[in-house]
Image: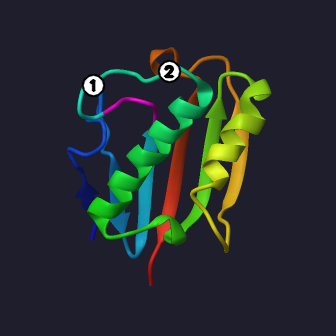
Amino acid sequence: MKQIINTGNAPAPIGPYSQAVAVNGFLFLSGQVAINPATGELNQSSIKVETNQVMRNINAVLLEAGYGFEDIVKITIFLSDMSLFAEVNEIYGSYFHKNFPARETIAVKGLPKGVNVEISATAYKA
């Protein structure tokens, strides 16, 4: 059975999608950008600040569903420019400590609201 996950501790969807969907132990998280859920504003003062906000938003959705970073099995990182990879990777890596998820990083022509980084994830709990 499919369960829709939404929390006020992460940015509200700005289109016809949910923050996450849980089904059969899997949790599919929509891409998160650096919107501060308390203010609705983008936080783009630096790529490190932007990435930390994205990861905090992911954490909020995970927690709402009863999951944690240790349950993530797959991450996709979208970057506006591959030159940002090292700084994003540094912040991203600080959220994981062992048994790292599978990951891909892709540079794209444009991201919603002109952000520099968007991250989506899939988590699993038996």
The C terminus lies in which quarter of the figure? bottom left
76 left or right of 64 in image:
right
Q: Secondary structure at mark 1?
A: loop
* 60 sits left or right of 100 in the view: left
Q: How many marks?
A: 2
Q: Nearer the viewer, residue 16 or 73?
A: 73
Residue type at mark 2: give it.
Gln
Q: CA distance from mark 1 to mark 2?
A: 13 Å
Q: Residue at x 39, y 69 (%)?
A: 67
In the image shown, does 74 or 2 lie closer to the viewer? Answer: 74
Q: Say which residue label 1 marks.
A: 40
Left or right: where does residue 83 sit relative to residue 9? right
In this figure, which colouring scheme has been used for the structure?
rainbow
Picture residue at 72% right of the left edge, 48% below the top = 104
> Tag 1: Cα neighbours inside 10 Å, few (<14), some, or many (≥20)?
few
Name the magenta segment's main secondary structure: loop
- Residue 64 at x, y percent in the picture: 27, 60
Q: Which residue is mark 2?
A: 44
Is residue 98 rendered magenta in the image?
A: no
Q: Quadrant of residue 78?
A: top right
Where 45 sits versus 92, above or below? above
Point out the residue furthest to the left here.
8
Residue 62 position in % (x across, y down): 37, 60
Q: Amino acid at mark 1?
A: Gly
Say if 97 sits above or below 44 in the image. below
Q: What residue span does the magenta drawing correspond to?
A: 32-36
Quadrant housing residue 41: top left
Under tag 2, what secondary structure? Answer: loop
Residue 33 highlighted magenta (yes or no): yes
- Residue at the extreme bottom of the image, as rendered: 126
Return the residue nearer the eye: 76 or 64: 64
Position of the N terminus, as image quadrant, is bottom left
